[in-house]
Image: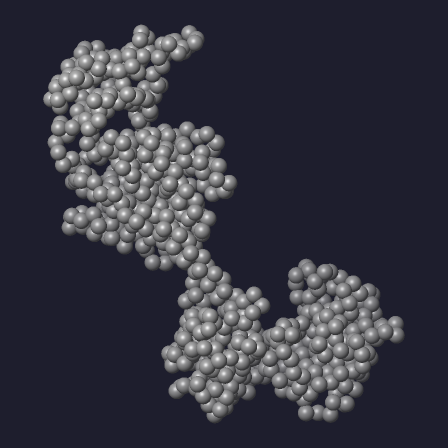
């Protein structure tokens, strides 16, 4: 096989020693390969001085996984590491068992085991330009002089171009953050450990043990990437750290102020109980890990009892204590308990540390996500209504189901507002995204919708104004919304949507129907948007369901179909209580493992007016082209005023009604509906038709085009003079001209 072609800057290159095309490549590979094979080193490497930074950069490294991955890629010339001392002194260095402090030498965080180091200078042009080094574990007992001499002899075999720009390896390494060329050295029984009952792979096959270990690292990383929540991280660690090492217990303890808090455990609870809630200094082993950042491996019960009697528990014969780091700081300890004597080989110690680093990253990620989720949830609970208003004619209740912690808190909300004229505003909305920003925007939208609705604006105008407000909030977030203005007396509802699923109605007979309305665009998508509304009947005894798209279990499921299905599944016994029905719907909507979004739903049951509608409201219809209808409307209004003891208002109401009904019949060319509502301080009158064009008084016209659609005569001026206030708004089918007359 030929030497691999040139690779990308992020690749770790593997050099084929026996079959390399270039003699320089082969010579470099043979030197570090023999340092491992002939000298019995665990790992060997060639470091070259970088002319730009004056750092030592790993050029070629030989060994087997996982140890080969622990060698630092770059060492500062002034570092306390022994390789740097070789360059500074220009002399060979040997240490039978060098000590180190992980806080000062973080590059060695994955090499915790006892070891020996030997390094010899490599010269170029009469100056020290690099280091050939090797590590042994367990530490060497051989004569250090002979070891250094043999290493120096290997260094002398390096080609003249090994430390110059002419080196084929260094030409490939000419990039800002070089990765070393890896020379694999697989021996029979590599990384098999010293435990006769615990073997990695097939000992008689070279590379089997090392690759079996790296397989565990891969599967752990894969599981941690999918983990959602701290519990899932602990489960992945148990599956791919504890079990492959035959550990009977895994405990993850994190510093929480002056106490240790067990974030999770698997196996026997005794070890978790020994550390949970205790001070870090209570256990000598845990205290050492937290203060030094170095792991501790206790191979048997006697050693554990002598070194840390506080943590020695029944069933734990051996212990591995590994640091958990976040942001460069040791924040906790991972404890692996074994139910038998366990001597961990150097390769196994390295493997455990590599796996713990991966677990710590995932753990910190999920802890941050859960903290943000908790913050957003608390914020959202403050922003959602504490309780919905109580009305005699309708019963309302709402439910909110938060999203999974991994998804973050969403921006779903609900609200109910008492509106002028005894009507009721019902709101359900969803701000896109998850997190604190969504919750904050949700609170602002809820407040604005309440304010606009309380001012008496129709549903379409409420959404238009809210859209403009959201666009001014300097946010990239959009929102969907459903606003329903319910009129219990007339058993109707005006529905305005902003890209939101429409409400669903369950009739008294059990039939379910979607209350269709123009979908419109979400809030803040378009500048100065126009929103249209729809109107639907909501008879007494019916149930109205407003919801967000979280009602659908999966992203591809239809929320409208899901909402219909939830109402269709309700039983007669469930409908007797709105609260019980809301609980049942929420339970069915919370599909375990499938729901990816939060969910807000509001359930409204129209109980019917407590008093007969005729006692306070009036309603009549005029057929299209019935030009006697205006006279019928006048008589109806006069009779209504007389029946309610408002004879003093009869003339004004009759004149206003005559003008508005006549205009509707002439200009709208449609059926006309008249509505009256008695209030303590006045009468509210509405005339509805199917023409959305607002009435235009003659006095304000300025062109023939305007005059063609103007209300001829002085009718609208009369309306303005006789009323305390009046206006016109679209109602979903056309327009409503409304008038208030004070008593």
Q: In the picture provided, is 379 more to the left or to the right than 644?
A: right
User: Would you identify the image quadrant in which residue 518 lies?
Assistant: top left
Residue 581: x and y in percent read 22, 50
Q: Residue at x 82, y 78 (%)?
A: 90
Q: Residue at x 75, y 68 (%)?
A: 55
Q: Seen from this angle, which residue lies furthest right?
A: 126
The relative height of residue 254 versus residue 475 in the rendered view (above or below) is below
Residue 328 vs residue 433, the one in the foreground:
328
Q: In the picture provided, is 156 more to the left or to the right than 431?
A: right
User: Would you identify the image quadrant in which residue 121 lies?
Assistant: bottom right
Q: Residue at x 35, y 19 (%)?
A: 694
Asked whether the viewer can see residue 612, the reply is: yes
Q: In the picture, which quadrant includes the C terminus?
A: top left
Residue 8: x and y in percent read 68, 59
The relative height of residue 141 versus residue 481 in the rendered view (above or below) is below
The relative height of residue 732 versus residue 130 in the rendered view (above or below) is above
Q: In the picture, which quadrant includes the N terminus?
A: bottom right
User: Would you identify the image quadrant in which residue 29 lies?
Assistant: bottom right
Q: Residue at x 71, y 76 (%)?
A: 80
Counting every numbered tag in the picture gives 0
| Color scheme of the displayed model | one colour
Residue 724: x and y in percent read 28, 21
Residue 494: x and y in percent read 29, 32
Asked whether the viewer can see residue 355, the reply is: no
């Amino acid at each position: 096989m030929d030497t691999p072609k040139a690779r990308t800057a992020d690749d770790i290159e593997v050099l084929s020693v026996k079959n390399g095309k270039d003699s320089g490549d082969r010579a470099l590979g043979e030197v570090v390969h023999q340092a491992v094979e002939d000298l019995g080193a665990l790992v060997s490497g060639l470091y070259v001085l970088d002319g730009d930074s004056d750092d030592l950069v790993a050029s070629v490294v030989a060994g087997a996984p996982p140890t080969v991955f622990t060698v630092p890629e770059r060492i500062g010339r002034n570092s306390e590491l022994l390789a740097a001392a070789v360059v500074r002194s220009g002399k060979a260095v040997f240490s039978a068992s060098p000590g180190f402090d992980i806080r000062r030498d973080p590059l060695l965080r994955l090499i915790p085991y006892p070891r020996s180091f030997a390094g010899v200078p490599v010269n170029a042009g009469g100056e020290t330009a690099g280091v050939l080094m090797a590590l042994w574990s367990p530490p060497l007992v051989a004569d250090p002089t002979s070891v250094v001499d043999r290493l120096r002899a290997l260094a002398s075999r390096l080609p003249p171009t090994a430390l110059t720009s002419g080196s084929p390896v260094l030409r490939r390494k000419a990039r800002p953050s070089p990765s070393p060329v890896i020379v694999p050295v697989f021996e029979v029984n590599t990384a098999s450990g010293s435990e006769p009952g615990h073997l990695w792979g097939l000992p008689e096959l070279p590379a089997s043990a090392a690759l079996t270990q790296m397989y565990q690292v891969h599967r752990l990383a894969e599981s941690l990437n999918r983990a959602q929540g701290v519990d899932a991280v602990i489960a992945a660690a148990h599956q791919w750290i504890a079990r492959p090492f035959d550990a009977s217990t895994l405990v993850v303890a994190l510093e929480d102020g002056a106490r240790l808090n067990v974030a999770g455990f698997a196996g026997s609870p005794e070890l978790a109980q020994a550390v949970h809630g205790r001070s870090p200094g209570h256990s000598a082993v845990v205290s050492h890990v937290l203060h030094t950042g170095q792991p501790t491996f206790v191979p048997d019960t006697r050693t554990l009892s002598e070194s840390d009697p506080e943590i020695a528990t029944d069933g734990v014969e051996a212990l591995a204590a590994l640091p958990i780091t976040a942001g460069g700081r040791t924040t906790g300890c991972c404890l692996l308990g074994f139910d038998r004597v366990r001597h961990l080989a150097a390769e196994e110690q390295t493997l455990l540390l590599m796996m713990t680093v991966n677990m710590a990253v995932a753990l910190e990620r999920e802890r941050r996500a859960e903290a943000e989720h908790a913050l957003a949830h608390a914020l959202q609970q403050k922003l959602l209504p504490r309780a919905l208003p109580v009305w005699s004619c309708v019963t309302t209740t709402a439910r909110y189901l938060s999203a999974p912690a991994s998804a973050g808190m969403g921006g779903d909300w609900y609200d109910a507002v008492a509106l002028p004229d005894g009507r009721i505003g019902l709101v359900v909305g969803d701000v896109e995204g998850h997190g604190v920003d969504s919750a904050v925007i949700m609170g602002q939208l809820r407040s604005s919708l309440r304010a606009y609705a309380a001012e008496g604006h129709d549903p379409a105008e409420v959404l238009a104004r809210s859209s403009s407000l959201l666009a001014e909030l300097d946010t990239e977030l959009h929102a969907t919304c459903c606003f329903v203005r319910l009129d219990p007396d007339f058993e109707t509802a005006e529905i305005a949507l902003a890209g939101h699923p429409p409400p669903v109605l369950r009739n008294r007979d059990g039939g379910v129907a979607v209350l269709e309305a123009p979908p419109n665009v979400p809030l803040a998508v378009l500048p100065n948007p126009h929103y249209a509304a729809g109107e639907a009947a909501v008879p007494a005894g019916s149930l109205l369901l407003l919801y967000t798209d979280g009602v659908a279990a999966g992203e591809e499921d239809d929320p409208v179909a899901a909402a219909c299905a939830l109402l269709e599944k309700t039983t007669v016994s469930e409908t007797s209580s709105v609260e019980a029905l809301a609980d049942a719907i929420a339970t069915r909507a919370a599909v375990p493992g499938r729901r990816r979004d939060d969910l807000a739903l509001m359930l409204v049951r129209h109980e019917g007016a407590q008093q007969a509608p005729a006692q306070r409201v009036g309603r009549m219809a005029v057929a299209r082209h019935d030009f006697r209808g205006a006279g019928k409307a006048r008589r109806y209004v006069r009779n209504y005023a007389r029946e309610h003891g408002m004879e003093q208002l009869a003339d004004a109401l009759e004149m206003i009604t005559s003008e508005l009904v006549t205009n509707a019949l002439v200009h709208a060319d449609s059926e006309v509906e008249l509505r009256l509502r008695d209030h303590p301080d006045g009468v509210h009158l509405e005339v509805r038709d199917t023409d959305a064009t607002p009435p235009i008084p003659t006095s304000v016209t300025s062109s023939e085009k305007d005059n063609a659609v103007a209300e001829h005569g002085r009718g609208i001026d009369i309306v303005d003079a006789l009323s305390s206030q009046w206006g016109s708004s679209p109602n979903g089918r056309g327009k409503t001209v409304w008038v208030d007359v004070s008593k």
